[in-house]
Image: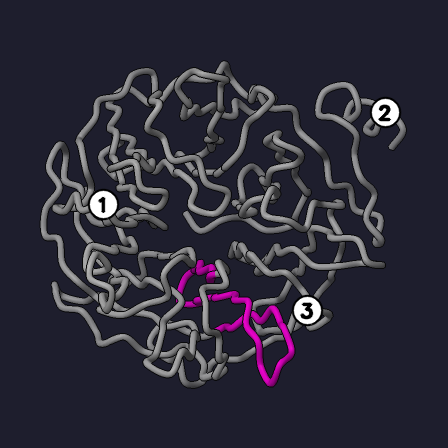
Amino acid sequence: MKTYLLLGILILGLPLMSADGSLFEMVKTPADNNSLAPNICSFGDHFALSWIERKNNGPARLQMASWNGLSFNKKNLVTQSKQIFANWADIPSIIEAPSGDLYAHWLSRISNKTHAYGIRIERSVNQGRSWNSLGWLHNDTSATEHGFVSLIPENRHVRAFWLDGRMMSNPKGKMMLRTAIIDGEKIINERVLDEDVCTCCPTSAVQLSGGPMVVYRDRSPKEIRDISFVLGKSRKWSEPTTLKMDNWLMPGCPVNGASIDTFGNLVAVSRFTVIQDQAQVILRLFNEGQLKSGKEIVLDKDIPIGRCATVCTKDSIYTVWIGFEKNQAVLKLAQVSLDGKIKRKMTLTPIDGSRSSGMPRAIFSGGYLWVSWTDTNQVRIGRLKTDGSINP
């Protein structure tokens, strides 16, 4: 153990001992200071980290670096622009399509208005060494908000979901949930899935055996903002359906979405919500096509901040979120069995409870659960050894 700890300190960074004795290892990244918006994406049997670097009086840069099994490779530039909209909550992402091509999304200012930005798509055919722009994801360039993107593989292509504010140029206009297919160099089949959703909560999506599923924070005329989902099957889409009626009355956007993942027929959705004035983080488990018979597991009701990220393996479901411990904001983890029993809960690391910590993200790779976040204008990533393996 002493040798292992020493290696962790020299190669990975200082390990943090959890309450149950597990080691959460901080891993060094190639990100510069003044970096933010980290995200993690799986590339076959490895993964990559993406983030934004901001420079004084210069263009912001979207960077990525692949993990080689021992350390991160040298970072590669995806794109740079003075028009990059660098936001703590609405973060870029990268995905590997079934074809092997990589696609990245980022936000670009459309006008000088504060909240006028759109979604740009980049494509790489050489595993991220160079990138070409495909332009706007959406067929609208109004000076409104477009963002909170989820990218998932579909057949040989990539499906995108996003929040689209083109109707909000009208004072009575609503934020929409839209989707489209990215097919090689083309963006096709754009359509509306929900005409009135919460304006600025992250979306999350997976590809199930029967088709894609996207979860998002909905919005009713009475300002109830519960989590809903839409399912796609045989080129048709279901009507928006509430995941669970929490009846959270919220007059503004909480910037706190849901996270979905799947293994086999099991679907796991974590969410931050408020039920009868009590903030909670809840994990819902159900088999595909059997939502009504699902099981709800309350992970935290001690005034959590939320911002959940959930990962499924063959043995367990792991959910990460921001909570509190002795008045200190911390990054928390719960490991839940496939039948819905909490195996363990632990604190990973202290964290800034403000927006500066961004949106934690998590994946499983190489026998480890990897978690990213922002700490004092610096991208961070850590890992925890687990006993599961990811869905192939």
Q: Is residue 281 magenta?
A: yes
Crowding around mark 3 (Cα neighbors within 10 Å: few <14, some 14 to 19, many 20+) is many
Crowding around mark 1 (Cα neighbors within 10 Å: few <14, some 14 to 19, many 20+) is many
Crowding around mark 2 (Cα neighbors within 10 Å: few <14, some 14 to 19, many 20+) is few
Decide: is 183 above or below 59: below
Q: Is residue 150 magenta?
A: no
Which is closer to the viewer, label 2 or label 3? 3
Instruction: Tell me which amino acid carries mark 2.
Output: Thr
- Between discs 2 and 3, the one toward the N terminus: 2
Which one is nearer the viewer's eye here, 318 or 63?
A: 63
- Between discs 1 and 3, the one toward the N terminus: 1
Which is closer to the viewer, label 2 or label 1? 1
Q: What residue is disc 3 on?
A: 300
Q: Give the x, y percent position of residue 194.
A: 24, 68
- Name the image quarter holding residue 186: top left
Q: CA distance from mark 2 to mark 3?
A: 35 Å
Which one is nearer the viewer's eye here, 321 or 53?
A: 53
* Rendered image: mark on residue 124: none
State whether the magenta stretch is mostly helix, strand or loop. strand
Q: What residue is disc 1 on?
A: 143
**In the shown orientation, is residue 167 left or right of residue 107?**
left
Q: What residue is disc 2 on?
A: 3
Instruction: Tell me which amino acid carries mark 1.
Output: Ala
Q: CA distance from mark 1 to mark 3?
A: 39 Å
The magenta region covers 257-285
Q: Is residue 270 visible?
A: yes
